[in-house]
Image (tube, rainbow, N blue to C red):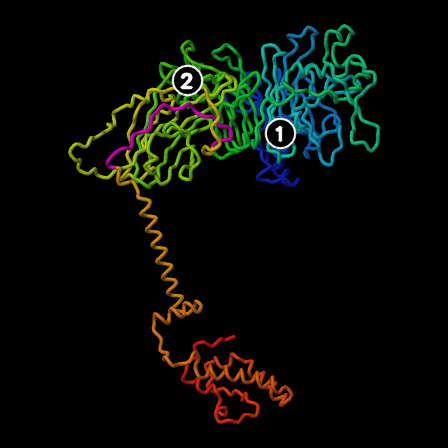
Amino acid sequence: FWPLGGIADNPMMMCTLKGKSKERDCLNYIRVLQVVDDERLYVCGTHAFQPQCDYLNLGSFSLDGRPEDGRGKCSFDPSQSFTTVMVDGELYSGTAYNFLGSEPIISRYSPSQSLLRTEYSTSWLNEPSFVFADVIREGKNRADGEDDKIYYFFTEVSVEYEFFGKLLIPRVARVCKGDLGGQRTLQKKWTSFLKAKLVCSMPELNFVFNVVHDVFILKGTDWRDTVIYGVFTSQWGNVGLSAVCAYNMTAVEEVFSKGKYMQKATVEQSHTKWVRYNGITPSPRPGACINNLMRQQNISSSLHLPDKTLQFVKDHPLLEDPVLPIGNGPRLITKDVNYTQIVVERVRALDKNIYDVIFTGTDKGVLHKSVVFEREVHIVEEIQLLKNSEPIKNLLLSSETRSLYAGSDSGVVQSPTAFCGRYSSCHDCILARDPYCAWDPHTAACVNVFDIPSQKLIQSLNGDADVCPSGKTDYQRVTVKPGSSAELPCLVHSNLAQVMWKSNGSLLTEASRFHLIAENGLLIYSVAPEDQGYYECWSVEWASAAGKNFSRLLAGYILNLELPPRPPLQAGQPTTTLSSQETPGTHADAEGNAKTDRAPLTSALAPPSFTSTAFFTFPPQTDTSLTPPPSSTIKFPPKQYLPPNSNVPPPDYQDPAAEYLQHNNSTALLFLFLLFFLLFLAALVYNCYMQYLPAPCLKLRAALLGSHKSTHQQEYTACEAGLMETSTTDKINMTEQPTQNGSQATQNLRALRDTGYETEPECGNGRIPSHSFGDNSPSQEKPFDVDCESQPIQFADAD
C-alpha cells in the first residue's frame, strides 16, 4: 500500500461516505503490475475506489511519486474482473470505467496519445467478465502488411438471444495495435473492434461450456503456429464439469477476416434479437486493420476510413461465425473439478517430438498436469499446492527456471514443473508418460531430462513399459497366530492402475474373510491353516497409446501360522526345515518392478508378541497377455485385468506339529445335539410342573409326584358330583313340566348357567338358590357346594 493522501482530501473517508466498507473495500489493492522496461514497472491500485497508477523503480523499489488517474486502467472495486497487457509501452486494459462498475471499457493508454476506448453500448460490451488479454505479432510475417493485434477474452451476457435468465456467452474480441480512432465517427473510439463467440461444447451430448475462466496463448515462432487454450465451465454449476478447449490462431483469424456480421432483429416478440446481416458490406471491410490494399487506396490510418465503414462497425460489432475448437470438442474434460487457471509449455521429448504440457489450477488449490497427444490428453499427476484448499487465482510459468508460481489470497507458492523423483521404479516412470522425466538405468532413478545428458536415458511416452530392465522383488514373511487377523499392505502410486490380489498363484475370490482396506491392502480375518501361502499384490495399467496392459508385482508376502513348541520326535520320523535365507528356485519367474520398501509390518498385522517378518528375494517375470478376471473375484475398480499367472508353488503344510489344528467336526455336532436335547427336556419338565400343558402332561405329573385319591373315590368330588346331578335333574324337570312354575324355572336356569361361580376362592360363602322344583327332601335342603370348603376341585372348568 502507498499513503492515501492528507486529511483534507482523504479518499478513504470519501469511500466510506459512499457506503463502502472501510475495513474491506476502502483500501489500496494493487491490481496492475506490468513491465515497462528493465528498470520500471507500471503499477495501479484501487486507492479506495479512486484508482491511481504510478511507475515503480526496480533499482530502489520506490515509486516515482507522480500518480496518474487510473480510470480505465484499473478497476474501482477490488472484486471486479479486469485484464491488462503492456505492448510497446502502451497499456491495454479491460475493466469498469465508473464507481458503480456499470460502464465496461476496453481501452488503450499511451503516454504520447489520448485514451482510446470502446463505445458505451450493450451491443459492444454487455456486462463482461474479463479474464485475459495478449498481443499476437502478425505484422512481421504477413504479406498483406496487416498490423499486430490484441485479443481480449471475456464472458458476457448474450445480446443475441432472449432467455428467462441472463444467458452467458464466452467471447473473443480483437483490436488493432495501430488503431487511432475515427476522424468524425468514432472519435477516440476503436474502429477495429469486433467480437465473436467461442465455442466449447460436446456436440454428441448437446452440452455447452459457456463460461470461460482463464486463457493462455501458446505462441510459436510463426503466429500461425499459435494455439489458444481456455478453461471453461457451465453456467449452471450443479453439473460439476470443467473442460479445456484449444483453438488455432488461424481459425480465429479466419472468423475475423471473413466472417459474416450480425444486426439487431426488427421482428417483435422474437427470442432471437440479432440475426445475420445479408446486405452489402461497405469497403474497406469494417473492423479490418490497415493493410497494403488500403494503403493503395490512400488509407494509411484509421483516421482516413470513410464514415460509412465506421458507422457500420459501430452498429455491427458482433460476428455470426463462431470460433470452433480443435477437433470440434474439448481436449480435456474433468468431473467434480473446477478449473480456475491454466498455463501451457511446449516440451521436446527424447523422441524429438514436441508435446504441449498443460498445467491447470483448481478452486481447491490442486494442480493438474496433463500432456497433449495426437488423440488424447493424458493426466500425468495431481498435486496439492495450497494446504488450505484455497482457489488458485494466478498461475505463472517460468520456462527459464522451469518453475510454476501459484497465487492465492494468502500467498504465493513456487513449484517445479516436474517431480520425477516421486517415481521409485522404472515402470512408474515410464507409465507416467511425462515428457520431463526419463529412467536412468545406471542410477536406477527417474530423473529430469533437462538436468542430465539424454544419451543413456529410457523414455517412452506411449507408455510401453517393456523397455524397462528386469529387477527383483522382495517377499516378506508374515507370521501370525491361528484365528487372528493379518493385514497385507499394498501401495499404488498411479491413479490409473487397478489392483489384483493372488494367493498361491490363483486370483482371490469373494470370501467373507478377505477385505480390501486403505490403499488397496488386504485384510484376512481369522487366519486358518488353509490361508497359509504366498500372497501377491499386482498392479495392472492400460497404456492406450501402446494398446496393451502392463502388469507388475507391487508386493509379495509369505503368510505362516505361529506353531506351538514341537513335541519330541520319535525314532524314524523325518524332519523338514526351511531356512530364512533359502530362495525357492521355483520363484525364478516372479514378476518384477515391485516396491523396494522393506519396512516391517506394523502392529496392525498382529501384536508384536507374535508377529515376525522375514524377507525373500526372487527374480521377476513379465507377461503382458492379460485376460479379464472372473466375476467372482474380490471387488476392485470397474476396469479389471487379470495379472499373469504366477509360477510360485503353494507351500507344503504336511508338518506333524500342525496336527493339533485338525478339528473333529463329528464330535462337535454330537455335543451340540446333546446340549439342545437336554435343554428341551428341561423345558418340558418345567412346563409340566407349572401345569402349562394339557391333560397328558398333568397325568404324567400326577404319576411322578404321586396321587392321594382313594381307590373307592369317585371320579369327581362331592361338590362336583352334586353340581353335575343337579344340572341333570333340572334338565329333566324342565322337560317334563314346561308349564309349571315357569318364572321360577327360568330364574333357576339363569342361576345354573353361572358355572364359574363355584371356582372362586370365596365359593364357601356363596348362596346358590335351590335347583329343585317342589322336591323338599332333606338331602336337597343343604346347598351342595358347602362340601367344597374342605375338598379341592381338581377338574373344574372355568368356562
Q: Main secondary structure of the magenta part?
A: loop
Give the class, few, some or many, for how many residues have Cα within 10 Å of label 2's Cα (few <14, many ≥20): many
Tell me which numbered mark, 2 or 1, is placed earlier along the sequence.
1
Q: Is residue 166 magenta?
A: no
Q: Which residues are magenta?
A: 636-657
Q: In x, y percent, where is residue 170?
A: 67, 26
Q: In x, y percent, where is residue 647?
A: 36, 23
Q: Residue at x 63, y 18 (%)?
A: 327
Whether residue 485 can be seen here: yes
Name the amino acid, label 2.
Val
Q: Is residue 598 above or below residue 291?
A: below
Residue for badge 2: 447
Kindly indicate the quadrant of the structure image that contains residue 561: top left
Whether residue 50 can be seen here: no
Q: Is residue 650 magenta?
A: yes
Locate residue 312 relative to residue 600 in the image: left or right. right
Name the amino acid, label 1.
Thr
Residue for badge 1: 233
Numbered badge on residue 182: none
Give the secondary structure at mark 2.
strand
Q: Is residue 565 above or below residue 458?
A: below
Seen from the viewer's position, the closer of residues 795 and 332 is 795
Seen from the viewer's position, the closer of residues 252 and 37 is 252
Kindly indicate the quadrant of the structure image that contains residue 278: top right
Seen from the viewer's position, the closer of residues 719 and 651 is 719
